[in-house]
């Protein structure tokens, strides 16, 4: 049997890891630029922490971890006999792999609240797991890069996060559209069509418009118990046209009788106008169908799409006023975003946007001609590394052709040669692997040239 990895997961080669680290380092740098500080949480959380935070569909996608030892020892024999997996799970699995970084963050804030200064701005770059059906751009194990600020109601935070998103993608060279909506607007729409109790059903369904189209969404809404009249009233709202300002004005008119709807429009107006004043390189759009299906959002909703590659959301987030309340700390508002590093990686691959120097970690390879030459090479390599120049020596005394083939395959731009002549002269011959030119230099001259 050939070795393999689970579906929805991937190995990454050295080149792929250099590219991924380029993404992580870019995002990490911008997070720091905006005042966010890093934390980490465990890969697994108690299921009691995770369950019920992502909606019914999200709960189904949680990876559960069987209890240690004889996990069936405490299981109800009747449930086992009936194969009642729904009720059996809590008896045989107490932990699960984290589904995202936001809920563990909320748990972290509540657990460490006496040690934190609010507002608290944190970022986190770690893998998450979802038992989803693997497909292009969707994996079961993937990294998220989150930035959240908690303990502040101010919409300045939303404006700042949009600036942060814009800066990250500008540095990566990806053209994007940032879509905005507000959960209060969605609640107002639910009131307007006479189905305030169906808010969750509405948001879960309309969030799929881009994937399945309005007709299929209407079918799902009917299956979820919405009346034909409500579905008919919803349709023109979801298809409002015109500029962002015109759509926002129309939305304000439609939701004039809904207090929560008006509040949502006001919040959108603030975020859109202040962001426009500061300016964005990205395109900013209003999308009233945007729901992002997670139940914990209560205000602004953010989603980012790449303009030049057909792939799902590459960043998303929003405002969540009640998340810490379920862990015993009510009244603490938060807002955050999550960069989908794996999808960003796929976009950069598709558009070939990586810097050329990412291809190799080594700048100079020293050829190995024997014990004496290798000893001199290692002494000079130490000087190179002290000067910040990445260098290595071919470990074996092999034929020159084999060593040069290694340098070419690894994309190493320079080869240093120390033979009998160089030993006597106290120099090295430095070969440029791109141009093919060679020059004889002292170690210090080579350092000046390469540093």
Image (tube, helix red, strand yellow):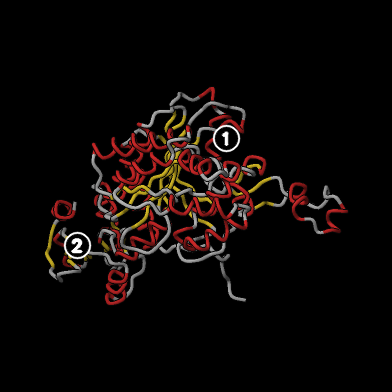
Q: Are marks 1 and 2 in contact (CB under 8 Å)?
A: no
* Label 1 vs 2, first from the N-terminus: 1
Residue 279 lies in what quarter of the image? top left
Label 2 environment density (alpha carbons within 10 Å; few <14, some 14–19, many ≥20): some
Q: Which residue is mark 1?
A: 107
- Please indicate, yes or no, whether residue 122 appears anywhere in the rendered image: no
| Number of numbered discs on residues | 2
Does residue 247 appear to the left or right of 46 in the view shown?
A: left
Q: CA distance from mark 1 to mark 2?
A: 63 Å
Position of 68 relative to 134 (above/below): above
Please tell me the numbered disc located at residue 423. 2
Secondary element type, mark 2: helix
Residue 356 lies in what quarter of the image? bottom left
Does residue 191 appear to the left or right of 149 in the view shown?
A: right
Tell me where residue 97 appears, x and y as whole percent: 60, 49
- Quadrant where the N terminus sits is bottom right
């Amino acid at each position: 049997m050939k070795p393999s990895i689970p579906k929805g997961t991937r190995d990454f080669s050295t080149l792929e890891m250099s590219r991924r680290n380029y993404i992580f380092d870019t995002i990490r740098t911008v997070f720091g630029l905006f005042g966010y500080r890093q934390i980490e949480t465990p890969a697994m959380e108690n299921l009691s922490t995770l369950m019920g935070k992502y909606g019914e569909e999200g709960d189904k996608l949680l990876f559960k971890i069987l209890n240690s030892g004889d996990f069936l020892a405490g299981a109800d024999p009747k449930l086992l006999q009936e194969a009642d997996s729904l009720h059996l799970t809590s008896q045989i699995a107490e932990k699960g792999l984290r589904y995202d970084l936001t809920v563990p963050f909320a748990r972290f804030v509540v657990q460490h609240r006496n040690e934190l200064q609010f507002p608290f701005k944190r970022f986190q770059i770690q893998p998450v797991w979802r038992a989803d059906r693997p497909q292009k751009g969707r994996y079961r194990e993937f990294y998220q890069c989150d930035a959240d600020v908690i303990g502040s109601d101010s919409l300045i935070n939303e404006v700042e996060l949009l600036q942060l998103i814009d800066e990250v993608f500008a540095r990566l060279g990806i053209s994007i559209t940032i879509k905005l909506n507000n959960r209060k607007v969605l609640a107002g729409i639910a009131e307007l069509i006479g189905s305030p109790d169906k808010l969750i059903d509405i948001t879960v369904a309309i969030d799929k418009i881009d994937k399945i189209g309005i007709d299929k969404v209407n079918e799902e809404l009917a299956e979820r118990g919405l009346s034909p009249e409500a579905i008919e009233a919803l349709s023109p709202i979801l298809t409002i046209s015109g500029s962002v300002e015109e759509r926002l004005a129309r939305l304000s008119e439609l939701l004039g009788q809904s207090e929560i709807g008006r509040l949502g429009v006001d919040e959108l107006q603030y975020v859109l106008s202040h962001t426009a004043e500061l300016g964005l390189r990205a395109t900013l759009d209003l999308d009233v169908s945007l729901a992002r299906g997670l139940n914990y959002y209560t205000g602004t909703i953010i989603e980012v799409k790449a303009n030049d590659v057909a792939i799902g959301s590459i960043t998303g987030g929003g405002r969540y006023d009640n998340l810490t309340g379920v862990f015993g700390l009510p009244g603490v508002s938060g807002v955050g975003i999550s960069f989908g590093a794996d999808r960003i990686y796929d976009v950069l691959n598709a558009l070939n946007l990586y810097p050329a120097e990412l291809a190799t970690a080594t700048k100079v390879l020293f050829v190995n001609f024997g014990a004496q030459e290798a000893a001199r090479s290692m002494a000079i390599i130490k000087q190179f590394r002290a000067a910040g120049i990445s260098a290595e020596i071919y470990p074996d005394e092999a034929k020159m052709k084999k060593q040069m083939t290694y340098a070419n395959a690894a994309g190493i731009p320079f080869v240093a040669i120390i033979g009998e002549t160089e030993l006597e002269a106290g120099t090295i011959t430095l070969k440029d692997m791109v141009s093919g030119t060679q020059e004889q230099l002292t170690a210090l001259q080579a350092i000046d040239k390469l540093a």
